[in-house]
Image (spheres, coloured by chain):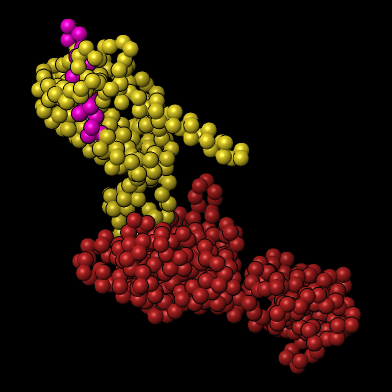
Chain colours: A red, B yellow
Amino acid sequence: MKVTFKDVTLSYDGKKDTLKHLNFEIPDGSLVSLLGPSGGGKTTTLNLISGLLPATKGQIFFGDDDVTKKDALARKVGMVFQNYALYPHLSVRDNIAFPLKMQKVKKAERYKRAEELAKLVHVDDQLDKKPGELSGGQQQRVAIARALAKSPSLLLLDEPLSNLDARLRIEMRQEIRRIQRETGVTTIFVTHDQDEALHISDNIMVLAHGTIQQFSTPTALYEEPSNLFVAKFIGEPVINTLPAEALKADLVASVPASILARAVTAGVRSEAIVPFDNGQGMVAAIHAGLRHAQKYGREATAELSYNGEVLLSTEMADLPQAQTEGDFFLTKAGFFLFDEAGALIFGGDSHDQ
Amino acid sequence: MAKKLSKILLYAIVTLGAITMLIPFLWMLSTSLKTAPETIKVPPIWIPKSLQWGNYIKAWSEAPFARYFVNSVVVTSVTTVGQLFTSILAAFAFARLKFFGKNLIFVIFLGTMMIPGEMLIIPNFVTLSKLGMIDHYAALIVPWLASFFTVFTLRQAFQSTPEQIYYAAKMDGATDWKYLWTVLVPMSKSTITAVTVLQVIGSWNAFMWPLIVTNTETMRTLPVGLQAFTTDAGTEYQLLMAASTFVIIPMVILYMFLQKYIIAGISKAGLKG
């Protein structure tokens, strides 16, 4: 089911405009992550989609249906809560079948459906247990099965992996992707973990300060952040930022003067600082001091001192340990300039205008 | 060593407490098996010379205890079921629903708990007599169909269940009514059992109110019926104690069966009986 927000605004608890003028469209059958820092409006946006919170202004559409005034039940969404919210007194089978029981589906039929779903989420050997006897990952699977039981218009997941340990998280996020592919249900997933979002989403919506910072594919988010906030939020290690002033002398050859005049902040991904011109488009050559810092696993980081700024690079592993300075290059990919308001004015695909 | 000593001390105190609680019961049992002269003997004797089992038969036939028994069962069960029903609904409203003046109403109800029960006896009696309910089952039951103590206790239990389960149930298509009876009540089983048992015991043992609102013998409950052994000529202690024993036996059995739930429920809700 396609979801469309038309100028949706929410104000509540006396705070004004918790969410401001949201406009977006989530394509049918896709998996979308709502990503952002705590308090940025992710869960609130999810609650607006589910109908648990009514919009103050604006319209929400499911397909061509205006559902703005409909509650969660009428919108037929399936939801997985952060703490799973399973019914502790019911068996796994009865938990999954509960939504069907509420719809007065016959017992034999709803148990059959519960068993199918249990098979889909791989808990078919746990059907007679109570939720309390299951591990966190299994409870998560049951919660997903229950949410899918009523063939929902949308599957919504509110930070579903945050209660799981690291290894299980990776397994469960792949499971969620698999289940989503197998059922084809449009899925919306709230997370504050960019790694999670980047790995499983078709599209990511970055929310902060009650507005959409960017809504695009994971690749575009990384390669073409629409503003400084997104550039800093996405990527590990965090993008190098420095005043554009410090770089200007080295950029005059490659960046138009009109853009350079407006540039306030420069962002350089750590993999965009390379020791040799690899012929893939360089935006600047810089002379900088070098200090090899840490090496762990297949990753090595080095600190470059340049015009009083420290830049982190992950591409210096092959240089001799003794080298303390040199001429380095900044690749076009992974180099961005932002104006005073933080908007992207150079870099990604939008450069050379 | 110090740990062991404190454990010994702890057990000593607990044992002392248990004995203190048990002595009246043992005295009741012992007295119920004595002859009339033995009951008032000084110094008191604990073990009668010959056990007077006949006291039980005599006590049972001295007053219409079968009728009292039926009355007690009817009053206790109707009061408990009715009170539980209204309390569950009210507790749910206070715990989960949003409505105008909720907190104010709650505080006012809470305030009613501060009024001593004795103060209400006269106004309640007047009200019921104007309604023509005196000397009917209604007088024994209706005033107890609502109990804020039960409401309050259940509200605490309901509030301690995760709110997300409420939202989950709503999304799964459960109405408030369905959620209450198929999710919230089963989830709060231990607290509900605890308040039920407390109510059953309270209702079963109630003396003052049934005494005041009933006149005819056929409407009396067991505790009131025990008065039969106190006459102008004195009290027949051995019969009174024999009757008291069979009056409390159903409660003892009930408690033994539900002990596990009662303790769990009481400690969970943080309430005192």
Residue B131 magenta-drawn?
no
What secondary structure is the stretch in magenta mostly built from? helix
Q: Between A199 and B68, which is closer to the camera in this rendering? A: B68
Residue B250 magenta-drawn?
yes
**Magenta-highlighted residues:** B231-251
Residue at image coords 49%, 50%: A12
- Horizontal arrangement in the rendering, residue A346 relative to residue B50 (left or right): right
Residue at image coords 38%, 37%: B153
Q: Is residue A65 visible?
A: no
Report the quarter where the N terminus of chain A lies. bottom left
Q: Classify residue B72 by image quadrant.
A: top left
In the picture shown, does residue B68 fall above or below A154?
A: above
Residue at image coords 60%, 79%: A220
Q: Between B254 and A230, which is closer to the camera in this rendering? A: B254
Q: Position of residue A300 (x, y in %)?
A: 75, 79
Q: Is residue A119 visible?
A: yes
